[in-house]
Amino acid sequence: MDANSRAAENLRYLLWTRGEDRALWVERVAEWTGCDRRRAIRLLRSGRFTSGEQERIARVCDVSIEELRFGRLVPDRPDLILHENLRYLLKTLEHGEQKRLAGLLDMETGTVSRWRGGKQLPEGKTQAALSRYFGLPTGTDLQTDPIFLSYPPADDRQRRQWLRDRIENLNPELLSDLFPALERLFEDE
């Protein structure tokens, strides 16, 4: 992972540890850095901070600039990362879908509940099956890749919801302008 990607992950981790609602991450970064929403989105994705932005983030979050830019703030604890990834992914399941997932994995529904609560963690083969189920990129390791910090979301369900939310909130004029392109994009579905 390059320094900019690490810095972006660190920024998202700082937001997460402060208990910031994911839906407000953009606003919070804009507030911390004094930038607009577009710039805040770019910072969450890229981690390419100006010196002033990194100084303000470091001051607000009480971390050094070196830690923010070059360290890895996410603890090197596979159990913690796996647990948080499971919580993040499993909360996307709709009513009754946890039972369906358990059936596909040939497990009891209670096992999935214990994963969510952190009382039990799935083995490696089951982790790979979960990655496939949630549509995560090939090669994703649920013990080392902090999916719960992804921006934008890394899994299919959260991406679809992200798109729905953005489309729902488009102003009517912009939707009218974008509709022909969206129609062409989705007409073969």
Image: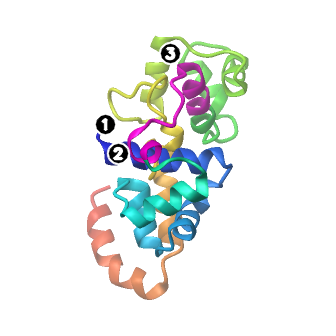
Q: Main secondary structure of the magenta part?
A: helix
Instruction: Give the answer, above or below, for where 80 lies relative to 65.
Output: above
Work out how far the residue at label 1 is from the one at label 3, CA to CA, in angstroms: 26 Å
Label 1: which residue? 1
Instruction: Give the answer, above or below, for where 89 lies relative to 14.
Output: above
Circles 2 and 1: CB atoms closer than 8 Å: yes
Q: Secondary structure at mark 3?
A: helix
Highlighted range, magenta? 66-86
Label 3 neighbourhood size at 10 Å, few (<14), some (14-19), many (20+)?
Answer: few
Q: From the viewer's perspective, tell me whether residue 36 is left or right of residue 111.
A: left
Identity of the residue drawn at 39% across and 84% down: 176
Horizontal and vertical percent for residue 29?
53, 63
In depth, the one of 116 and 43 nearer the eye is 43
What's the mark number on residue 5?
2
The image quarter in which residue 97 lies: top right
- The kind of residue on which mark 3 rests is Thr
Identity of the residue drawn at 32% across and 43% down: 3
Label 3: which residue? 126
Q: From the viewer's perspective, tell me whether residue 86 is left or right of residue 109.
A: left
Q: Secondary structure at mark 2?
A: helix
Magenta span contains residue 71:
yes
Horizontal and vertical percent for residue 168?
53, 71
Q: Secondary structure at mark 1?
A: loop
Quadrant occupied by the C terminus: bottom left
Horizontal and vertical percent for residue 169?
53, 74
